[in-house]
Image (tube, coloured by chain):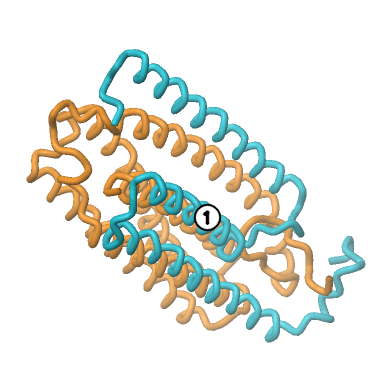
Amino acid sequence: MSEQPNAPVDGVDPMQEERREFRSYVWGAGIALLLTLVPFALVHWAGLPRMPTLIVIGIFALVQILIHFRCFLHISFAHKREDLQLILFSALLLTIMVGGTIWIMASLALRMAMPAS
Amino acid sequence: MSREAAKYPGLNLSSAHGNDHEAAESLMFGFWVFLMSDAILFGMVFATYVTSVHATAGGPGPYQLYDIKSIFVETLLLLASSFTFGMASLALKYKHSTPRLIGWLAATLILGVAFLCFELHDFSTMFAKGGVPSRSGFLSAFFDLVPLHGLHVAGGCIWLICLVGQIARYGLDTKAKLGIMRLALFWHFLDIVWIAIFSVVYLAGLT
């Protein structure tokens, strides 16, 4: 790229680059598989109490989403700033709207004495 | 940093692709904006589901309706299809032969269709147990959320078939390349939505 003097195109061996990106996909799929297996096994076999299980499922899902973003969608901090800002803005909107909806509706259910659990 | 900075989400073509790499930037950004708005749509449908998960109105609930083994198979199918699409992206970027690219795309299509078959089988099992959308608020919300994802996957499969037809007819030109790259984003995005579905709907429902 002529506008990127610090990124010499010819300095990168395409074969090496391909191996690196192939490994990224393999690692991504492997870690995602592990992060899938654990919560499924937990729900299917282990009779843990409800709350700890839910927390583990939530954490594993978040980590797996991050892995997918990193290894499959190739989002990193080396990105153009607009892409990252868009992700942050969408995450903010999601948090406000989803969190707000669940909060308000749960509070409503509690106060209206609907069967909550 | 010896590598080129990423210009857009997804696997970036290198400058070995000449103008295609430049042409991708605005298209990929536009498609990324669409995906983020789609994520917000899914988020709101998730919120609807979570708020009505207890509203079973005396009808069947998650324990009677969900089948964890089938969900597990669907999860593996979708994860495998994400990986095969990644291989297709690599075949595109590093200019492997077109048959090899088509082969990975075909593998992705088969996995996607298998996922849809399992999902439809799940729905028909639920219907047989009285779990129809009109039974309760919980089931309405369920059939708003999960088939919405299924429709996205079906749309992705149709798009994939169209792209393969396009390549067969016109060759691997700029339009075909950019189509595959956008479909790759779409496909990986759907896998991410599925992570949320199997965690929030199925695993949390069966806990």
Q: Residue at x 37, y 34 (%)?
A: B50
Q: Position of residue B97 (x, y in %)?
A: 53, 83
The one nearer the camera, B121 or B171, is B121
Label 1 residue SS: helix
A11 vs A59: above or below: below
Q: Residue at x 86, y 74 (%)?
A: A8
Q: Residue at x 56, y 82 (%)?
A: B96
B32 vs A13: above or below: above
Q: Residue at x 43, y 68 (%)?
A: A33
- Where is residue B135, by image quadrant? top left
Q: Which residue has dot 1 on it?
A: A65
Q: Mark 1 — on which chain does it sit?
A: A
Left or right position of A63 against B64 = right
User: Chain B's shade in the image?
Assistant: orange
User: Chain A's shade in the image?
Assistant: cyan
Q: Could one spot residue B169 in this view of the protein? A: no
Q: Position of residue A59 (x, y in %)?
A: 50, 52
B192 vs A86: above or below: below
Left or right position of A79 against B72 = right
Q: Dot 1, crowdedness within 10 Å: few (<14), some or many (≥20)?
A: many
Left or right position of A90 against B23 = left
The one nearer the camera, A29 or B27, is A29
Q: Position of residue A61 (x, y in %)?
A: 47, 53
The amino acid pointed to by label 1 is Ile
The one nearer the camera, B88 or B165, is B88
Q: Position of residue B77 (x, y in %)?
A: 34, 66
Placement of the N terminus of chain B among the 4 image quadrants:
bottom right
Left or right position of B67 against B157 = left
- Where is residue A45, by image quadrant? bottom left
